[in-house]
Image (cartoon, rainbow, N blue to C red):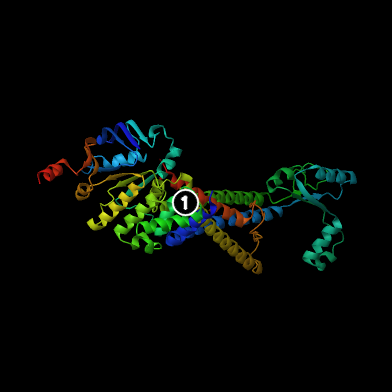
Amino acid sequence: MIVFEDVTKIYDPDVVGLQDFTCHIGKGEFVFLVGASGSGKSTLIKLVLKELVPDSGRILVAGRNLGTLRHSKVPLLRRNIGCVFQDFKLLPNKTIFDNVAYALEVVGDPRRSIRRKVPEILSLVGLSEKTNSYPHEISGGEQQRVSVARAFVNHPPLLLADEPTGNIDPETAVGIMQLLVRINRTGTTVVVATHDRDMVNRMRRRVLQLDGGRLVRDEHRGGYDQVADVEELGA
Amino acid sequence: MRLGFFLSEAFGSMRRNWVMAMAAVITVFISTAILGAVLVTRDNLNQGATSLKNRVMIEVFIKDEATDEQVTALEQKIQGIPAIKRYEYISKDEALKRFRERFGERIVANLPINPLPASYEIQVKDANDVDAVAQMFFEEPAVDNDPGTHNGVKYAKETVRKMLGTINLIGYGMWVATIIFALAAILLISTTVRLSIFARRREVEIMRLVGATNWFIRWPFVLEGFITGLIGAVLAAAFVWTSNWALANWLETSDINFLDLKVFSMWWQSGAWPLGLLPTLAILGAVLGAVGSLVALRRYLKT
């Protein structure tokens, strides 16, 4: 689904975003990206969305080479990638319903299909009651669920989440993570960049650890860091 | 293009950001109203200048001793000058009659003979040509010149020169004012649009992340700018027209309307308005709003 080959991205001046990064994420996988702030997690996500262009190396998303993808085709790429962010990125002047519906309007879904799909997905994330609320009227956890609903309403083959639980309390975070797992079960590839140690340790999924823009660990069924594994084995 | 969706997006966002929308409408209103006022004033001054110019007249007096052939030759010459709009022959009797009407019976009653010469009253098409046209008659044999002078041809040389100078100066001044206020209107409107889009740059960013194409993002903003500009400019045109109408009415009833101030049609062609005042200003406002939105969006839509 995602292929990075020797990808390097350096920001001005001389700040390493990603350095000689190579990895392969298969269809239907659930992957955690871990690492300290500035280790390159967000850079990686932005590169997949073609918000950034790498200085060197090759990136393939769903078989398409982003290097040769024309500017005009970038929106098409993004429609096939659901996105969830730490700061939710909801449109403040639109209701919950309209926020989710916007993702469908963008792809040209007919009105009738929008009226069917949006309530469906909102009930899936447990927000049927808040359809007509505005983002500022609901809690952070609820806003994040709206954002997940928007990311998934098109049933994209790939879903990226950048610190999805960074701004919400641990209990609510579990709910969000469960949603992501359910989405993964439908066949969607899910990539989650996170700081949430407990979550990663509990879920035991593939972990890609970044440090200074380099890949330092790629472990299937891994923990947040190797120390955690040692402690767990010792216990 | 999904016009229904884009329109509802545009109206929806104006409703939700109504303070910003109002500010934009008021900005458009004020700047187009000032521009409209300048343009109407310019038209009115042009009108007044034209009416003043039309009153400029050349009088060519004819000697009593002139032969019929000489007078005929003079008249043929007048007919042959394309710069002349119209002319009128005033016979000696006619001149006396006019004099009588003006100064009363008693002065004329005691005259043994009619001392007034016959004349041609000539109006030129363009007041700027008065001098040149007048000079053509200086040496005509039929003209009643005192020896060595050209006093048989009378026209308000100095007055015409000064008047034309003033009118031309005002004309240039109004052009400068028009350009300045048009620029001011463009700048004010585009700044307001830029501000309102700057306030919503995050929205634009989110739309892009969800996979909206640039035109999908642009249309609602462009329509919003168009509607805002249209409302502001139509209000401005209505305001300018009403003020013009009220002022012209007031001047008509007073006796200082020497400039022939008139009310310009709001709808159809009148003088300098190829489309009429209202359509011109409305189109100007709407186009400015739409183009302003397009330009302001450009920096947020770079991929």
Compare residues B221 and B174 and report the one nearer the observer: B221
Task: Determine whether, in the image, residue A88 is placed left or right of residue B298.
Answer: left
Q: Residues within 10 Å of mark 1 (few under 14, many from 20)?
A: some
* Chain containing mark 1: A
Compare residues B10 and B241 and report the one nearer the observer: B10
Residue at x-position 80% and y-position 51%:
B87
In the rendered image, the residue lying farthest to the right is B68
- Considering only vertical position in the picture, is A111 above or below B100? above
Compare residues B6 and B210 and report the one nearer the observer: B210
Pinpoint residue B68: horizontal percent, then vertical percent.
90, 46
Pinpoint residue A68: horizontal percent, then vertical percent.
41, 32
Q: Quadrant of the N terminus of chain A?
A: top left
- Considering only vertical position in the picture, is A71 above or below B57? above
Q: Secondary structure at mark 1?
A: helix
Compare residues B219 and A50 and report the one nearer the observer: A50
Q: Is residue B31 visible?
A: no
Which quadrant of the view contains residue B104?
Answer: bottom right
Task: Determine whether, in the image, residue A167 is placed left or right of residue A90.
Answer: left
Residue type (three-letter) at the residue carrying disc 1: Glu
Which quadrant of the view contains residue B98?
Answer: bottom right
Report which residue position mark 1 lands on.
Answer: A105
Pinpoint residue B160: horizontal percent, then vertical percent.
66, 50
Pinpoint residue A74: horizontal percent, then vertical percent.
42, 40
Q: Is residue B234 visible?
A: yes
